[in-house]
Amino acid sequence: MELVEVIALAHFEDTRIGAISTKQRTRVPKHIAEQLIGLGLVKYANPTQAVVKEPVKTEAVVDGGDEPLLLPPQGQALPEPIATLSRRGRPSRNARS
């Protein structure tokens, strides 16, 4: 029996788990959680993250074939950014000339 943590969206009482108050966190069996979610009484506290797998990025070649992007050689460094932005979107004082 897998337990999942849910948050109550409304006050309700269930004979299997008892009285639950709004915004109360509780752990219930997964099948009960699914039923209560279907009724709109609870939501998952920590929903599972969907795993997104990105395909290998390719760049179209003139003849229509796909060729993987080239990465810089191991010894070659990538260019450094010239200015960094502050939290307000302005260049930081250290980067100004």
Image (cartoon, rainbow, N blue to C red):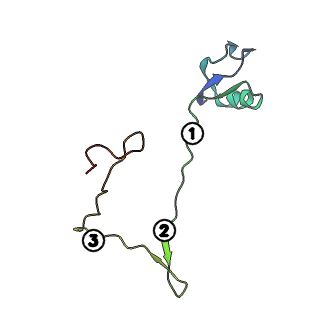
Among all residues in the image, which is located at the extreme top?
19
Q: In which quarter of the image is residue 5?
A: top right
Q: In which quarter of the image is residue 43?
A: top right
In this rendered view, identify the residue nearer to me: 49 or 65. Answer: 65
The CA distance from mark 1 to mark 2 is 27 Å
Percent position (x, y) of residue 35?
A: 74, 29
Q: Are marks 2 and 3 in contact (CB under 8 Å)?
A: no
Percent position (x, y) of residue 45?
A: 58, 28
Q: Which amino acid does label 3 sit on?
A: Pro
Q: What residue type is labelled 2?
A: Lys
Q: Are marks 3 and 1 in contact (CB under 8 Å)?
A: no
The CA distance from mark 3 to mark 1 is 38 Å
Label 1 CA crowd tier, 10 Å (few <14, some 14–19, many 20+) = few
Tell me: residue 90, above or below residue 28.
below
Among all residues in the image, which is located at the extreme left?
75
**Residue in the picture at 55% in, 84% down:** 64
The residue where tag 2 is placed is 57
Q: In which quarter of the image is residue 15?
A: top right
**Residue in the picture at 69% in, 22% down:** 9
The residue where tag 3 is placed is 73
Tell me: residue 28, above or below residue 38.
above
Q: Do the residues labelled 1 and 2 touch (CB within 8 Å)?
A: no
Q: Please give left or right for residue 73 compared with residue 4 in the image.
A: left
Q: Please give left or right for residue 95 compared with residue 48 in the image.
A: left
Task: Please tell me the numbered disc located at residue 48.
Answer: 1
Q: What residue type is labelled 1?
A: Thr
Label 2 CA crowd tier, 10 Å (few <14, some 14–19, many 20+) = few
**Residue in the picture at 73% in, 26% down:** 36
